[in-house]
Amino acid sequence: MKTSLSSAEVDRISAPLRSANALFATKYPGERPDRQPVHTVYGGAHLFHADAAQRLGQLALRALEEHAPDTATMARAFDLSLELTEKVRARVLHKLQTEPVEDLRIDFEDGYGARPDAEEDGHAVECAREVARGRKEGILPPFIGIRIKSMTEDTRGRALRTLDLFLTAMLEATGGVVPSGFVVMLPKLQIPEHAAALADALDILEPKLGLTPGAVRFEIMVEQTQAVLDASGRVAVPGLVAAARGRCIAAHFGTYDYTASCGVTAAHQRMGHPACDFAKHCMQASLAGTGVWLSDGATSIMPVGDRATVHAAWRLEATDIQRSLAGGFYQGWDLHPAQLVARFTAVYAFYLDALAAATARLSNFIGKSAQATLVGEVFDDAATGQALLNFFLRGLACGAISEAEALATGLTLDELRSRSFLKILAGRRAAR
């Protein structure tokens, strides 16, 4: 059929799009290919030792055995079916025995408090040496880091000193090696300059410590209203990330500081508050496709006391966690070892409960080579493919889904490791 646009006209229209599309691709590269932890466990720096993860796992196992010693009790505690609980319990036990903590943050802020400078100096150096010892002995969790104080006027000097002392002592003890998965957490950002100041400090420290530029990455905490909307009413989160100059890898939501900054009274500060939903939707929409991980906050009710009290706290946390997962926040905080039971129970139940349907959908979807298909009552299109693949990648990474269960989709190990739905389709089409 004859067309009305000439080749020259098509080229003229396309010319500005080439640079615009290239710029878009740099700003929105898509999901990061590496593993995201399902949680971050916070603990005061004064309590940290190299074997902290193992100690937390032992305490979590003790809580499980004391308050949910069998499948039936665990099912009642979390309001799950016996069939699902039987699968979940075995995997939770294995997780708590082998990798009870995926991400650990050594806290010099809220979990540590204001202390004399000499005391914080000492803890910064001691913790750094313990991290180095943990690395040498192979007992660190996959992800670890420190949370320094904020860059606000009252604490910026203390924050920078702790950062300097910790990094210097750690690198002296490791022979100049940054442990895998190491990150610095910056809390209570209000303006982009707070993130820029931490980036400036790292720019100065890295060459002095013999590190390559950009070797130390950091995360930001969104826990002030000014970090969500700036003074002009614009979403502020992208500006905070941009100010980090490529160092920011994740944004964590601070439930209780944020609701307090909104004027919500303590009795109503909770993860499911509408104010939290608004803030997290702003984070999610503005950072989608950038490769910056998102993390939700923590449930503040600790599972401590008699069995009925512990069960109630577990159910509350599990509800919060599954709500976060359903909303696309795949990471959260844990503050107490007994919360690890609820964390992994909720996460594993989330994946295992949806496993059969996800397996059928992905298997059928791959088999039809991304043509729209109807499986049961769920209609898939090509945009769903990567999301289905991500379900299995996340489930595999945390131990909720076994390798055999992932391969039941018809994918091969090499295809799973590619982490790309489009690469899988391209490889299968090329093989025909």
Image: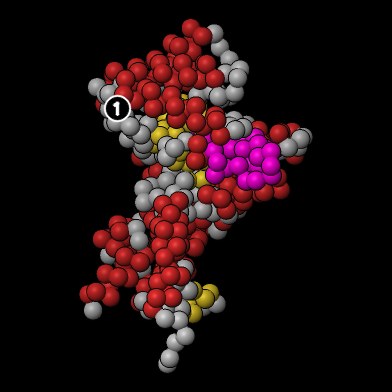
**Does any portion of residue 303 appear in the rendered image?**
no
Image quarter of residue 101: top left
Q: Please state which amino acid type lies under the numbered disc 1.
A: Leu
Query: Residue at label 1?
Result: 211
As for residue 224 lying within the magenta part, the answer is: yes
Q: Residue at x 43, y 91 (%)?
A: 2
Name the outermost residue toward the bottom.
1
Asked if residue 53 lies left or right of residue 301, the reply is left
Asked if residue 335 lies left or right of residue 230, the reply is left
Q: Quadrant of the C terminus?
A: bottom left
Residue 262 location (% of width, % of height): 73, 37
**Is 219 drawn above or below residue 382 in the view shown?**
above
From the viewer's side, name the closer residue of 409 and 419.
419
Residue 180 location (% of width, % of height): 32, 35
From the viewer's side, name the closer residue of 6 and 394.
6
**Is 294 drawn above or below residue 131 in the view shown?**
below
**Does any portion of residue 28 appear in the rendered image?**
yes
Q: Residue at x 54, y 29 (%)?
A: 194
SS for callout 1: loop
**Is 6 drawn above or below residue 255 in the view shown?**
below
As for residue 63 lying within the magenta part, the answer is: no
Asked if residue 26 lies left or right of residue 317, the reply is left
Q: Residue at x 47, y 46 (%)?
A: 292
Q: Which residues are magenta?
A: 219-240
Residue 275 location (% of width, % of height): 70, 45
